[in-house]
Image: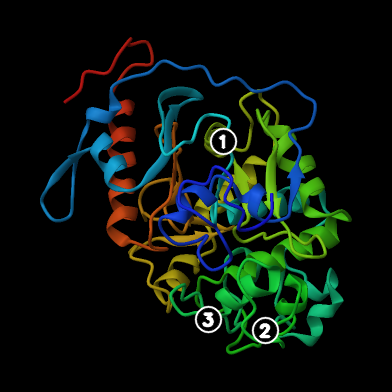
Amino acid sequence: MALGQQSSRPHGAVNLDNWQTAPQLQWSFQHIEDLFPTAVISRGTGPVAELPSRFESVGELSVPQFDGTVLTVAETMAATETDGWMVSRHGRVVAEEYHSGMDAGTRHLLMSVSKSLVGVVAGGLAAEGALDLDRPLTTYVPALGASGYAGAVVRHLLDMRSGIHFSEDYLDPRAEVRVLEQAIGWAPRQHPQVPRTMYDYLLTLEQKAPHGGPFEYRSSETDVLGWVCEAAGGIRMPELMSRTLWSALGAENDARIAVDSVGSGMYDGGICATLRDLARFGTMLAQDGASLSGQQVVPGSWIADTFRGDPDSRDAFAASPTETLMPGGMYRNQFWLPYPDRDVLLCLGIHGQMLYVNVATGVVAVKLSSWPEPQHAWKLFATLRAFDAVSSHLAQVSDGDAAIAVR
């Protein structure tokens, strides 16, 4: 289907100028394959890891808000442009809803939740001995020696602690994050000198500070990490992610990743997957790296390292010029850890994408959305509070109970 063609599109023509804006984005996030070139991340030929269901009334749980108001979980989902949401505990689905034309077989754009999938691929390569996290990036991609990434090591990418200059201001069309979209074909080219591939653009980035300093959220870190993983693994990312992650999860559906004109993936935000398969990914994280079928996808030591971090990880996070709004939290291995005293892990993407993993309670929650704005603090933290409330409640209920007594 050609970009801009109107067939069955509810809001008229969708094009490079408007696909990420309301009202078009609600449709486009569920139809990336119709808009841009993509590559298949195959689920392989193995059996599907079952997600049994026993639905419970978690939607009626009360969620106090920061402003003193109280919403139910269902009201929170309705107030935050939710396309689909799910909660499971120990691999059993207790809530699952779809809206906005989405259903269980719909692949939805994950935006920066994609980063966490790439982080797990890096963890798998490290476990195989193919990737050394303390080695310079130039060990794997010599061309980076002529860029601002010269001297950085793989660990700097995983924790977003390089010294590279890269603005993540989504509302500034001149910010590097938006110019990157021009290079891969996700936005109209504003200047003839903008490179025409992702890798060529990454080579233009400059260093502004010593590598290994404070955390700063930069999508370019994941894109360079994806490049390094391809070089270390010896194959392109769609095949690599299929081998090391997606086929091992027992996924029900293939995932897809948007690619540029030469087939390089949009590692920082271009993966599309179903809600249920994202729940399978989250369950693997909650089970020390083991899939629902018991296959070890990534070592438990990698999951433990993600929660533990380095001795200075929280200090680096606190010193960040990025507004994190997560006091005492940290960022590790391409995951957000919002609390200093709870083993809760988040995968986050703009416009309202979230994967929530609470190891202590075994609760995994997923929300895929179409917020009109890239970032919205109330919507983000209202969702987090809702999932915390569900997690806390489920932890107090025996797995043998037929239903939850709603407070």
Instruction: Give the mark toward the camera: 1 or 2.
Output: 1
Tell me which amino acid carries mark 1: Thr
Left-right relation of 97 to 262: left
- The quadrant holding residue 321 is bottom left
Q: Is residue 51 left or right of residue 343?
A: right
Of badges 3 and 1, the one in the foreground is 1
What amino acid type should be assigned to the residue bearing mark 3?
Answer: Ala
Residue where numbered disc 2 is placed: 205
Name the element at disc 2.
loop
- Pointer 2: residues within 10 angstroms few (<14), some, or many (20+)? some
Q: Which residue is mark 1?
A: 106
**Label 3: how many residues lie within 10 Å, few (<14), some (14-19) or many (20+)?**
some
Q: Which residue is mark 3?
A: 175
Q: Nearer the viewer, mark 3 or mark 2?
A: 3
Picture layout, residue 251 above or below residue 57: below
The total of numbered circles placed on residues is 3
Pick the front one: 292 or 271: 271
Q: Earlier in the sequence, mark 3 or mark 2?
A: 3
